């Protein structure tokens, strides 16, 4: 990275010192397009702590931002993030991309995509993913030019100016997929609950962290096709802390733990929409 071109702009990786200028550029680009955040939303919701997150991503290889500069001014950016679990680390999601209005159609987007693909290949990634508004003709043309293909459609993916619009799911393979390294799983026939008591539901508590962790470790050892692996299960202290924080927030009462009457161990955990609890149950820290 760090290459220049005939349009006289340079593309390089962003570093924490770039964040104030990058924040300002993102905010300006949001005002120039209908396909990104609402004006002011980025600065309010995502800018706080960006420098710290960028530093952590660079250290751990979990994400990167590329930026395009002209005469010291940022004219474009692209943010990409690796999957949060060990088994999805090779899937890179391109989540944030924008170019100043006066620089569109001048090769900035193409240079940013080339730079982030170079970074992804260096991470041994096997796939790039992104999501785009079906009405974003310029974006679709750019993504197709760089080898992305449509794999699906999200109906009513976002509301723009009061109108619900669909999104395309697009992807680019960086290397051929490999077959799973395990035989098909043979599931035993389902039985009844005789002698064990019917499952019961109760509110999830931070004190359940040890039981929940034991359940998850047992689950991943029995089902090799899950995205989560043994190394992705948080330790008991981390899980307890995250659950305690999450359960203090509104909506935590919708989280439930299923357990059997006969034993004290957890037999199932059903994650409903609650971000911090979800992270404790299904992801590892970035």
Image: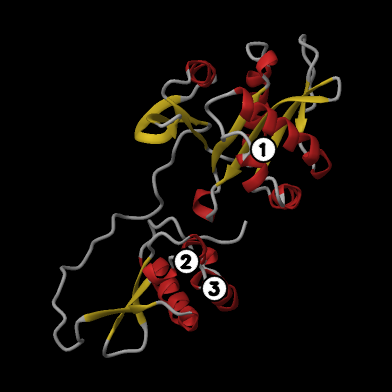
Task: Nearest to the eye among marks 2 and 1: give it.
Answer: 2
How many residues crowd around disc 1 within 10 Å: few (fewer than 14), some, or many (20 or more)?
Answer: few
Residue shown at 62% from the left, 30% from the top: 30
Query: Circle 3 — which element?
Result: helix
| Quadrant occupied by the N terminus | top right
Tag 2 secondary structure: loop
- In the displayed structure, does residue 107 sit left or right of residue 74? left
Report the front residue among 196 and 18. Answer: 18
What whole-number distance in Å separates the C-alpha atoms at marks 1 and 3? 32 Å
Tell me how far mark 2 sits from mark 3, CA to CA: 19 Å
**Which residue corresponds to mark 1?**
122
> Which badge, 1 or 3, is on the more N-terminal residue?
1
Q: Of callouts 2 and 1, which one flags the residue occurring earlier in the amino acid sequence?
A: 1
Quarter of the picture containing the C terminus is: bottom right
Looking at the picture, how far across and down is residue 80, in whole percent? Answer: 61, 38
User: Is 99 situated above or below 41?
Assistant: above
- Judging by the rendered image, the residue that carries numbered circle 3 is 239
Count of numbered circles in the view: 3
Tell me if 103 is positioned left or right of 185 in this view: right
Give coordinates of residue 113: x percent, y percent: 62, 26
* Nearer to us in this view, 92 or 162: 162
The extreme top residue here reads: 6
In the rendered view, does 69 fall on the left or right side of 109? right
Q: Which mark is residue 250?
A: 2
């Amino acid at each position: 990275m760090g290459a220049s071109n005939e349009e006289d702009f340079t593309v390089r990786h962003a570093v924490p010192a770039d964040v104030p200028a990058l924040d300002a550029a993102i905010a300006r680009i949001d005002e120039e397009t209908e396909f990104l955040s609402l004006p002011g939303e980025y600065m309010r919701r995502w800018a706080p702590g960006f420098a710290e997150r960028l530093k952590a991503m660079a250290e751990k290889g979990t994400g990167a931002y590329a930026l395009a500069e002209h005469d010291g001014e940022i004219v474009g950016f692209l943010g990409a993030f690796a999957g949060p679990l060990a088994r999805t680390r090779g899937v890179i999601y391109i989540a944030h991309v924008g170019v100043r209005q006066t620089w569109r159609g001048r090769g900035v987007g193409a240079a940013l995509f080339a730079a982030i693909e170079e970074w992804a290949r260096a991470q041994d990634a096997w796939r790039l993913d992104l999501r785009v508004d079906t009405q974003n003709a310029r974006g679709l043309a750019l993504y197709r030019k760089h080898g992305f293909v449509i794999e699906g459609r999200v109906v009513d993916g976002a509301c723009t100016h009061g109108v619900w619009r669909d999104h395309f799911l697009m992807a680019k393979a960086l290397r051929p997929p490999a077959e799973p390294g395990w035989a098909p799983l043979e599931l035993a026939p389902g039985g009844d609950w005789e002698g064990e008591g019917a499952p019961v539901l109760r509110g999830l508590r931070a004190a359940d962290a040890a039981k929940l962790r034991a359940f998850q470790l047992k689950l991943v050892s029995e089902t090799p096709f899950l995205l989560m692996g043994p190394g992705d299960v948080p330790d008991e202290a981390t899980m307890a802390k995250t659950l305690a924080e999450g359960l203090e927030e509104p909506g935590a009462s919708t989280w439930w733990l299923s357990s059997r009457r006969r034993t004290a161990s957890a037999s199932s955990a059903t994650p409903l929409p609650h971000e911090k609890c979800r992270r404790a149950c299904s992801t590892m820290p970035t």
